[in-house]
Image (cartoon, coloured by chain):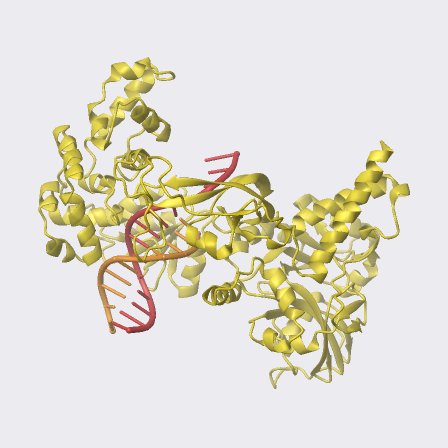
Chain colours: A yellow, B red, C orange
Amino acid sequence: MTVDFASRAAELREQLQYHIYRYNVLSDPVITDAEYDLLYRELLQIEQEHPELLTPDSPTQRAGNDLSEDFPKLRHPAPILSLSNAFSAEDLTAWEERNLKLLPAGTKLDYTLEPKLDGLTIVITYENGILTRAATRGNGELGDDVTANVKTIRTVPLRIPVHKDGPPAPERLVVRGEVMFLKEHFEALNRRQAEAGLPLYVNARNTASGTVKQKDSRITATRPLTAYLYSIVESVGVTINKQWDMLEYLRDMGFHIPPESHLYPALSDIIQQIPTWESRRNQLNLEIDGVVIKTNDLLIASELGVSGKDPRGAIAYKFPAQEASTKLIGVTVNIGRTGKITPTAQLDPVFVGGVTVVNASLHNYDLVEKLDIRLGDTVIIKRSGDVIPYVVGPIVGVRDGSETPIRPPETCPFCQTPIIQPEGMVDYICPNLACPERVFRKVEFFVSRGAMDIEGMGPQTVKTLIDKGFIADEGDIFYLNPEPLLELDKYGQKKVDNLFASIEAAKHRPLSQLITALGVDGVGGTIAELLARHYISIDNLMSASVESIDAIEGIGPILAQSIYDWFQNPHNRKVLEKLRAAGLNMRAEEKVAAGDGLTGLTFVITGTLPTLSRDQATEIIESHGGKVSSGVSKKTSYVLMGESPGSKADKARELGVSIISEEDLRKMVGDQT
DNA sequence: GATCCTCGAGTTCG
DNA sequence: CTCGAGGATC
């Protein structure tokens, strides 16, 4: 038993050493921080349970270290400490209780809440207001001298105070902060790389670290780094007793302090704020991996002292990791209803952001090539704002040569038709209109919500109907017989009855929904509504000229041509005639206006409303003469906000657009219910 | 010709 | 939700 632990501990030590080297010396880690943490914690646990296995050279026995050999070393005036971590509200409460036991009975604590910036820690020294030295964190006691590079960072003042009317600069001030790329700057940097045909940077944090440790500070100067300062390591000539005062003081001196930092009177207020932070995380212009909670009273904090390497007065609340690395074991090809091909990555299952991910979109082959992703690569998976995981890029360092490039297929995997890439387009498509996969996707779209909305007819049912040869196109849905369906597995009387009732109901959908369902390229619900209102019947639309369609406001020449072409296609016409013969509604009804109280107003809906669905809210607004659009802009009159709103609410505040609730809307239209 | 706005298409897991 | 591209507007 002990033998197993001994060999496992040795293995872990060796792995950790290697990763420390990759991370700190090469700035090119092959695993994510979270994975490193896991290995580290496993080793720590073995060593705690079997102290005899602890070796003096174990990675657990030394503080973090980012020293490289190329820089002279600077000694920090006081050790740069790390923080202990919390992963739940319980951890935080336990932390406070432990602290209160160490303090006189009845002590009340207030706290600051700051984002935990995911960058590179630096320590900057000012003497009589002049920046004299800057060092990396290093091992906490010694750091690399990166003064020349830090001086190129525009948000680091070379002289303080920056404003004349600020407090005078103290004799000596040593501040600690974080250097990082803002998301937009990192993206811009990568765009530049792409334009120059160079490989893209995968990870903002490591790139920032590599940039600060550039030997040639002229290169550093071309990279738009940002720095936030959040604490005073040492000072002569100024005394500050509260963390919050410290932040305000730093701000007054002209430093950037971590955005959205606040002071709260009690830990319970902080705990309440955490969900907000988690949801806001992805909307920030910078990477954060948690929040930092600090005891506001610095005298109490120093009284609490340190436990191991960590001060007791502060703690980091870490968000679940949103990044992980895993192996790309395959690529499958998806064909959409328009024929567009999207490659999907098949991954070794990996836990990231709270769920296990096995698939991730690779978007298009252009991107695959730009990122140089190869089959067999170890890739970094990220799950951010949109919750949908995507492949950030490969970790080139761990290739063993067996990786193979990913190319678009020569022929469609479903119909063997040669794949083409239309001129000037990013996408590859299967041009075969009769491609079984395309037909399937088209029918799937036809019956979906927003189109014909046939309940009880999901993708699985559609697939079965096509496979059994019961339908060959959208039109056949309305000529189905119930009897053969009952023969099938899992299709009982009740299910079939429901399905046929839905199909019957679909014959009476508004004209706009029928037009949407046809699946004309570039025509969704909004354009379909325009067409329905303008032409009143399918026949009018079918015989309309390109010029006539182009003349409609909101439709330009490209869409007009696409619509015209669709109706000229013999196959499409055949399907349309089937639908007509089946008795589908092909005329627009006069809209019964419920009122015109909202005429001229534009609404945007965000979040979950208390009682209405988004569709219902849209209907209420439109029936009173208002308009609903998807993005917030200056022209938006009101943003209708529900529970857990997205970034649109922030945008609205930014633009000064009024935010209303469902109740406000009801009042506006004079609804009594 | 540039800029702003809007629409459509595609996206994963439980 | 986000991105790319079409359309409108200046």
Residue A332 in view, yes or no: yes
Q: Specify the quadrant that holds the C terminus of chain A.
A: top left
- Residue A549 vs residue A84, the one in the foreground: A549
Residue at 15% of width from left, 57% of height from top? Answer: A550
Residue A44's x, y, as percent? 80, 45
Left or right relative to A337: residue A591: left
Residue A165's x, y, as percent? 61, 85
Left or right relative to A6: residue A671: left
Q: Is residue A579 above or below residue A408?
A: above
Residue A203's x, y, as percent? 58, 58
Could you say which quadrant of the image residue A347 lies in?
top right
Residue A483's x, y, as percent? 26, 14
- Residue A543 vs residue A201, the one in the foreground: A201
Q: Specify the quadrant that holds the N terminus of chain A.
A: top right
Q: Is residue A630 above or below residue A671?
A: below
Q: Is residue A591 above or below residue A392?
A: above
- Residue A559 vs residue A26, the one in the foreground: A26
Left or right relative to A28: residue A15: right
Residue A591 in view, yes or no: no
Residue at 28% of width from left, 43% of height from top? Answer: A431
Q: Residue furthest right?
A: A52
Could you say which quadrant of the image residue A174 lies in?
bottom right
